[in-house]
Amino acid sequence: MIIDVMQRTASTSIDLDLSGPTQLIFAVAAAQGLPIGSESLVITVDDNEVQPTEIIDAHGTRLHSVHTQGSNATLRYTVVVDGIAAEPPVADIDEIVYLRPSRYCESDTLGPTAASEFLGLEGIPLLQAVTSWVHEKLTYVAGSSRPTDGAVRTLLARQGVCRDFAHLSVALLRSLNVPARVAAVYAPGLSPMEFHAVAEALVDDRWWVVDATELAPRQSLLRVATGRDAADTAFLTCFGAGATMTRLEVSAVVDVFHTDDTDALTQLR
């Protein structure tokens, strides 16, 4: 059960070395629509504060873009969210976009596997079966996957990190005509603490959050970015000369810690 007065606090610190002129696009801020009590986002280039341009996508992802000319950049972000957001909206286009194969979720390739493993299931029982199957088949191993790995390679390797679990869950669900997408979140209770990725599935006209890693209670997750897969939800995107990350620190806490019932349905709010 989600408690309406739940308070979540999150922060991110990123340090970057820059090799030349670069556009940096950060997706670390709490998504639009959350009841934010307080928030601070500061970006510096060569120790001088710069003002980012905020760009908001269709799902409320708040991107902060800066064009840099210096040798190093930093981001410091903190947020306190008091309460929960409204239920995730469902748009007609969602049932088209989130049924299509995407860069990291090769649902067309995994169609025969999904059909044989989940024959005869649909609706909530199918969602629960896919989540349980991915949890059982994959082993969480930090650093085990490459940034270019998708759901097919994850299934072959039988191991991965949170984004790999999310990609495989999404690909299998799409193969079975269930619209599914990836969300990047802050995850109180996650250890070691890091940005976390989960899946969302559209069943019975509602978006349900799916986390086959079972590493953090879903009731406390705090939405940051939403999209087809990791290509849409990365916390940092660079265009231009490039950047090397020298520091990444993430924290997320909640005032009332939840014990997650993995068989229960919950939404990302």
Image (tube, grey):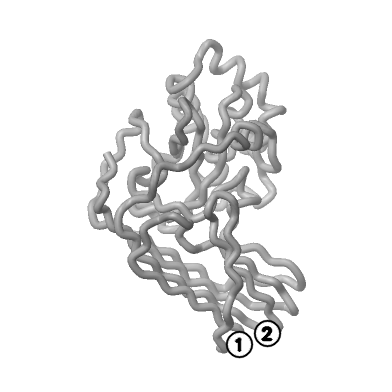
In this rendering, would 155 be left or right of 20? Answer: left
Q: Quadrant of residue 40?
A: bottom left
Label 1 and label 2: CA atoms lie apart by 6 Å
Residue farthest toward the front in the current orientation of the protein:
92
In the image, 144 versus 261, the foreground residue is 261
How far from the left and from the top, in percent, is residue 266? 37, 36
- In the displayed structure, would residue 264 be above or below residue 48? above
Residue 63: x and y in percent read 58, 63
Q: Quadrant of residue 54?
A: bottom right
**Which residue is the site of mark 1?**
46
Give amino acid for label 2: Gly
Tell me the amino acid under the disc marked 1: Asp
Seen from the viewer's position, the closer of residues 115 and 145 is: 115
Q: Position of residue 111 (x, y in %)?
A: 67, 23
Residue named by callout 2: 70
Q: Residue at x 41, y 44 (%)?
A: 268
Graded by Cα atoms within 10 Å as few (under 14), some (14 to 19) or many (20 or more), the crowding at tag 1 reads some
For the point 43% across and 25% down, the residue is 128
Identify the element where label 2 is drawn. loop
